[in-house]
Image (tube, grey):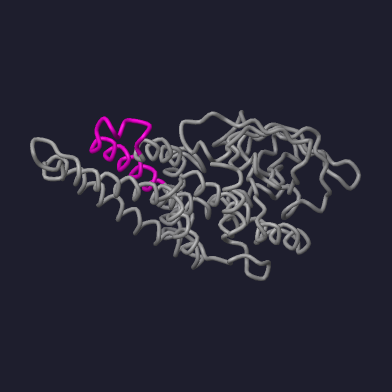
Amino acid sequence: VPPDIIRQVAEMGYFALRVPQEYGGPGLSTLESVIVVEELARASGAVAIMATVSGTMVAYPLVHYASPEIKERYLTKLAKGAIGAFALSEPCCGTDAAAITTRAVKEGDEYVISGRKTWITNSPYADFFLVAARTGRPEDRHRGVSLFVVDKSSCIEVSKLDMMGYRGSGTSEVLFKDCRVPESNIVGQLNGGFKIVMDALNEGRVVTAATALGLAEAAFEDALAYSRQRESMGVPIAEHQMVQYMLAEMKVRVEAMRLLIYEAARKVDAGDPDYPMWSSMAKLAAAQWGVDVARMAVQVEGGFGYSRESLVERVYRDVKMVEIGDGTNEVQRLVIVRGLLGRIRGVRAG
């Protein structure tokens, strides 16, 4: 995606979805953000995931945990078209976020941040980063992680990753080389960053799921249109029973994804205590069914679907990332089961 297009999208407010109106943002709910990202993904999965990161996963910690000064400075920037990046994953640790090794060492009234992050979406375009760094001992694990706002500067090196999908998202490896940030740039409490990160992920996963929904819708609609105009044995292939079977299966998955994602978003907006479980259910289902829909769309379109000229080939590559990013399918199952077992234990205790 050309950088000037990215900037135009940001200036239109799509990278500031959850920024409150008092800071100049649209102030969308989770459900409203889901609908916007779903529509973005129908056109570009890369732009949709960029909007998800900057507009929800970066905005959420700032809205709910940052100091008034940090809110005023950075939420206003997002509303005016700035782009944020969420720097959590490292080469050593993706799923095990409590094991991060990036360090933030206090020197006077500043912290010096050093370390390497990877799979960081928006990096080449980011005006600032939310960086999870270790301020405690390694053995403290999640109790020794803090969250910092780090402005783009010469101390940051960005190396774009060559990925299978989402190739326009600017997902990169990022090296922080002795970046100095004021102590006031801590989001929330010192050593309290891990909970903030988990809260952001729990909410953000619903919106990430919406990228899979939009991609699946695009693939289904493209395959349906192709099946009506492509002829085989004297009739459109849409009249062949096995193609009809795949079209029906795709439609069922798309609508089931939509219902589950929208309901999960409503749970988040209502503050339902079970919303992390619903968020994970939505993301797991959307990831699996999104891949299913893309695979069947390629199959319907045959050789053309397998070519780089087709839309469904790109969708197939893009949607696979939803099974990995923001917590793998396996992690989502763990979150779901923990939610179920916690509820069962609560009933038994009562």
Question: Is residue 278 visible in the rendered structure shown here?
Answer: no
Q: Is residue 192 above or below residue 102?
A: below
Name the dominant secondary structure of the magenta segment: helix
Q: Which of these two is toward me, 318 or 1? A: 1
Where is residue 156? Give x, y as percent: 74, 36
Q: Which of these two is toward me, 214 or 115? A: 214
Taking the spot 34% from the left edge, 53% from the top edge, the residue there is 257
The reply to whether the magenta stretch includes residue 307 is yes
Which quadrant is the C terminus positioned in? bottom left
The reply to whether the magenta stretch includes residue 318 is no
Taking the spot 76% from the left edge, 41% from the top edge, the residue there is 135
Taking the spot 30% from the left edge, 55% from the top edge, the residue there is 255
Taking the spot 50% from the left edge, 40% from the top edge, the residue there is 325
Q: Which of these two is toward me, 32 or 62? A: 32
Where is residue 176? Give x, y as percent: 74, 35
Residue extending farthest to the bottom is: 22
Where are the magenta residues, as a range?
Answer: 284-310
> Which of the 4 image quadrants contains residue 169?
top right
Where is residue 43? Give x, y as percent: 43, 49
Residue extending farthest to the left is: 234
Where is residue 243? Give x, y as percent: 17, 41
Asked if residue 60 lies left or right of residue 146, the reply is left
